[in-house]
Amino acid sequence: MARYLVSQFFQAVLVVVFVTLVVAVMLRFSGDPAVAQFQGASAPTEEQLREIRRAMGLDRPFLVQYWDFLSGVLRGDLGTSFRGETPVRTLIAQAMPPTLLLALCSLGLSVALSLPLAIHAAVHKGSGADQAVRFVSLLGLSFPNFWLGIMLALIFGVTLRWLPVSGYEGAASLILPSLTLGLILTSTTVRLLRAALLDVLGSQYVTVARSKGLSERTVLYKHALRNTAIPIVTYIGLQFGGLIGGVVIVEQVFAWPGLGSLALHAISNRDYPVLQGTVTVLAILVVLVNLLVDLSYGLFDPRVRLE
């Protein structure tokens, strides 16, 4: 078990280092941030550009810059924004709570909707309810999340004026962006959970359990659902990465002040430290969630714990 934990930990560290390296290389080829400082002003002289590059630390070799960034991450220092000279960790600390709140609400909504729908559809396979669940879930998969977000904002925010369509001003502001992300996630989770349940319900040990006279409720909740937990938890963990990607777009649609808005603002300003710090924090977050998912397997299947 200890060897497994150490192996998983080093894999997670390697993934984060690789992601930060790729981001650093791509930023290197995306343009000169010193030139971006003069947007809207007169053309800078070479002397002015050299001075700004020196002040930003961009005149040093790439590997030196990257090593400074990595060692700074280990110390909890993500650098300073090119715009306003605010520490990047301060900007991320301000943007992180709204993003996590939105992601957790969306994930909770998805689990709360998909579990009963998938169980009902699997138990009543072939019925009208099963066909309706499959049709609606397929319909949900066909819509991109930004389109659904815009439609929800137009209907419930602009036309009916029931809910706010932008900003972060309390619980009511959470409803539309959470629905946007949660409904799309529900569509895929329902289909996966239904298929996993049907597979388990048709297995031999379920037939044996029924032949012993156990009630359908006991067979379903004590045996079938427990054995579908690992693929479902794995899928939800993988979906968390997609959810973070979706958050970036949905935050723009609803003017949500989270990490996605911070990253897009950094891209438009070529604020490399903010963008690199934001991507690093998101990568660490996704890797940590998937690590927790791997470690949770032992809770659902004792054989995994023994291995």
Image (tube, rainbow, N blue to C red):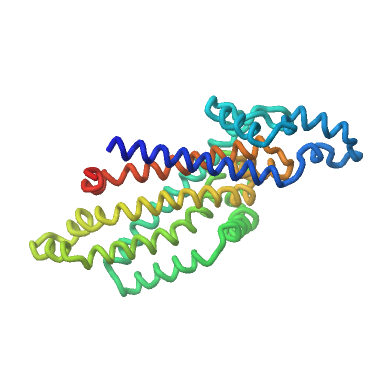
Compared to residue 195, the image places residue 102 above or below, namely above
Compared to residue 170, the image places residue 119 above or below, namely below
Q: In which quarter of the image is the N terminus?
A: top left
Compared to residue 145, the image places residue 82 above or below, namely above
Residue 268 quadrant: top right
Which residue ends up furthest to the left in the rendered image? 212
Viewed as shown, does residue 267 lie left or right of 221?
A: right
Q: Residue at x 20, y 56 (%)?
A: 223
277 or 104, which lies in front?
A: 277
Horizontal and vertical percent for residue 257?
Answer: 62, 40
Residue 52 in sight from this viewpoint = yes
285 or 223, which lies in front?
A: 285
208 or 179, which lies in front?
A: 208
Residue 112 in sight from this viewpoint = no
Q: Residue at x 72, y 30 (%)?
A: 57
Q: Residue at x 49, y 43 (%)?
A: 15
Horizontal and vertical percent for residue 23?
Answer: 61, 44
Horizontal and vertical percent for residue 131?
Answer: 37, 73
Q: Residue at x 12, y 64 (%)?
A: 208
Q: In which quarter of the image is the C terminus?
A: top left
Q: What is the tally of numbered marks visible in this picture?
A: 0
Horizontal and vertical percent for residue 247?
Answer: 56, 48
Viewed as shown, does residue 119 lie left or right of 162?
A: left
Compared to residue 244, the image places residue 217 above or below, namely below
Which residue ends up furthest to the top in the rendered image? 75
